[in-house]
Amino acid sequence: MRIVVGLSGGVDSSVAAYLLKEQGHEVIGLFMRNWHDTTGTLEGDCPWHDDQVFAELVAKRLDIAFHYVDLSQEYRKRVVDYMFSEYEKGRTPNPDVLCNREIKFDVFLQEALKLGAEAVATGHYCRKEERVVNGKIIYSLLAGSDPNKDQSYFLCQLSQEQLRYAMFPIGHLLKSEVRRIAEQQRLATAKRKDSQGICFVGKVDLPLFLQQKLAAKQGNIHEILPSWRRYAERDEQSDVEQLAEPYRYTVRDGKKIGCHNGAHFYTIGQRKGLGIGGRKESLFIIGTDVATNTIYVGEGDSHPGLYRRALRIDAREVHWVEPCEALGVGAERRLKVRIRYRQPLEDATLIQREDALYILFDEPQRGIAGGQFAAWYEGDCLLGSGVIKY
């Protein structure tokens, strides 16, 4: 089989390519450059040029063909512009999820098909299985075998058509095993550090990065006390729609304690970057209002403003990786859910209404923010996901 591997210059994709070649496949390495601008990139972050050099070294070592493609225009349009738009609205996007759906398994996949690929492989720590339902092949996306590196969450928006072509050669391995294989094969990436930060952009000073499109604008920071009366108004008997509503503060609900440079630069649950000290416990952002350019904060990790029991996903934003598993209107289902990468899976009930899917957690969840992706699992299988409305 002719397989195009997305060689990123990292150890994971390098070992993926090696394993596929060992299995007798015709392997082609394809490096994609998706970002040129260094505005906001933190000093010391490896530039894309180094990534390409390492990718080429691996291809040479494995004696496989190597190609290069620049997808920066599509990446800016589909991922970065979306980021700017979401932050401007006071939401918290996940560019890595979008990058996989829009770039790696869409634009990049099309480039791979031009090279005659029958499949596209990446270095993601996840697995794929298939079964036949009513005579049709259904592809399942499973968590990676390494519990500390499982990356299935980042692929939560993939479709059946995208999974049809996808291969994850290292999904059954532990990270330590991947490193060992790379060292044994004397791959140049064996001891290279894993990339961090925004996919293909790297680690950034987020406010500085966002200022490419979003202007800094001074606003006020107001503190909300844990005794705010509306926290007590929600109890175990509240309807799921009420429980999913974010707390809505006004400047009259708290005292001004400082200033900031733009509400759209901050997100729910954040504690760094406020520049306010002298507290027994850290201050956390519990609300933002981009219309009035106001940030609301609460003191301490146990502040009730940080926690909610439910969230809402608009019906048009609900995505089932396996459409045959989709809930009908009025249906409910017990599943495991996470709202961010590396968060432990939480017990919850999915409730499908006509206009939205609600997720009701057994325990209150910290830092639910609009724009994030919620992903739901049954066992190791990621069944679906959606963009959190609030």
Image: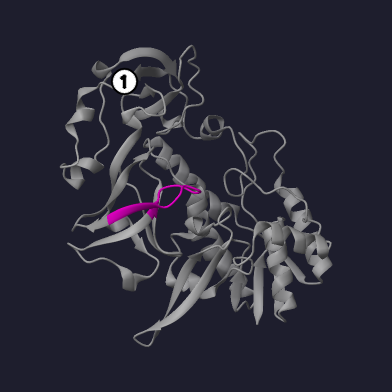
Decide whether residue 328 is among the magenta residues: no
The residue that mark 1 highlights is 224
Amino acid carrying label 1: it is Ile
Q: How many badges with numbers are in the image?
A: 1
Residue 77 sits above or below residue 111 on the image:
above
Q: Tell me residue 122's x, y (percent).
A: 62, 64
> Could you tell me which residue is drawn at 34 percent across and 70 percent down?
323
Q: Tell me residue 125's x, y (percent).
A: 58, 61
The quarter of the rendered structure image containing the C terminus is top left
* SS class, disc 1: loop
The magenta stretch is 337-349
Q: Nearer the viewer, residue 365 or 210?
A: 365
* 38 left or right of 288 in image: right
> Could you tell me which residue is drawn at 76 percent across and 64 percent down?
181
Q: Tell me residue 13's x, y (percent).
A: 68, 62
Residue 367 sits above or below residue 331 on the image:
above
> Could you tell me which residue is drawn at 34 percent across and 47 percent down?
388
* 163 left or right of 67 in image: left
Where, by quadrant of the figure, is residue 170 drawn?
A: bottom right
Q: Alpha-carbon neighbours of circle 1 within 10 Å: few (<14), some, or many (≥20)?
A: many
> Could one spot residue 252 in this view of the protein?
yes
> Could you tell me which residue is drawn at 50 percent across and 50 percent down?
79
* 273 left or right of 351 in image: right
Residue 8 sits above or below residue 93 on the image:
below
Where, by quadrant of the figure, is residue 260 drawn?
A: top left
> Could one spot residue 68 in this view of the protein?
no
The quarter of the rendered structure image containing the N terminus is bottom right
